[in-house]
Amino acid sequence: MQSRRTFLSTTGSAAALLAMAPWNSAARADNATAADQSTTALATRVIPSTGERIPVIGMGTSGSFEVGENTPEYEALKDVLKIFVTGGGTLIDTAPTYSNAEDVLGALLAEQNLRPKTWLATKLSGVRGREDGLAQFNSTLKRLKTDKVELLQVHNLGDLETQLALARELKAEGKTRYVGVTHYVEGAQDRLADIVEKEKPDFLQINYSVVTRGAEKRVLPLARDLGVAVLINRAFEDGKLFSRVKDTPLPDWAAEAGISSWAQAFLKFALSQPAVTAVIPATGKPNRQADNLKAGTGPDLTEAQRASLISVFA
């Protein structure tokens, strides 16, 4: 078994890209059922409000896409995107308040002509009032070099009533296909649950991991009951989980579950929660992108396997 640090360490990004190639054709069939997909295809799940399917492994951009142009990090992101799309990934989550992440993402998608193959989620973030929100959204479209996005979320519930109304207005105009609400800490989950119950957005985005499971109490069951799609952020606890399993071998059942790294184990833990639609881990490293995608193949974890992972951190 290999760790996150050593996975594909002896191979280049081109080899990682080739490794993803067999997944591509199977993963693009949005209307395929899970039973139709091979065990090596990136699984998809249904968006309850429409029946559209999206791949279970998405990609975040916070931190990882906040890089300068003409830097080694910028060049690496070219391969990160190639591996992601070739591996069947489509969902990319960003925000106008992630420094220059939208600019970098927009430039790279345009350079590689990947926008038609991606499913973009962004946010109304840190603004107050309809006019400020609209101005920010129009700026976002320019930065992303697109005329619409697939998902527009109210970030961290800021100026919620006004910004959610604006998002719905933009949805009616065809500028976004879905609207959602987000947060990233457990302390906000009760408020988020109240909002989901009242507003019934298409999506919610929330933090959830093997060590932060408060969303199981109310938010996730409520989302499942109401037919709200769920995106998971912070499945790695901002990377802190890797230091906690340093030099710890993977569980004995890992191979049976199709797991060859701790990153895959943590992502599969989140995906094995029934309400979850997709996880959105961020990375700027091609080999880690390939590793993350593998978590979207094979079976979900059983309850016993989930309990085993929880026990590692007890």
Image: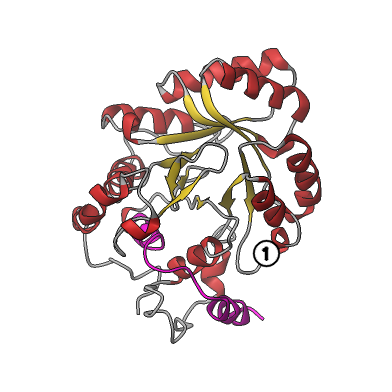
Is residue 282 in view from this perspective? Answer: yes
Task: Classify 216 as above or below 130.
Answer: below
- Which SS type dominates the magenta stretch? helix
Q: Which residues are magenta?
A: 289-314
Q: Residue furthest top?
A: 131
Task: Classify 84 as above or below 95.
Answer: below
Q: Is residue 49 magenta?
A: no
Residue depicted at x 77% and y 42%: 197
Residue depicted at x 60% and y 63%: 209
Task: Classify 298 as above or below 27.
Answer: below
* Residue hosting label 1: 212
Q: Percent x, y for residue 60?
A: 49, 45
Residue type of the residue flagged with mark 1? Thr
Query: Element type at marker 1?
Result: loop
Q: Percent x, y for residue 83?
A: 29, 49
Q: How is the image coloured?
A: secondary structure
Q: Percent x, y for residue 274?
A: 58, 60
Query: Left of 198 or right of it: where is 33?
Result: left
Label 1 packing within 10 angstroms: few (<14), some (14-19), many (20+): some
Residue depicted at x 43% and y 66%: 264
Which of 55 and 70 lies nearest the eye of the viewer?
55
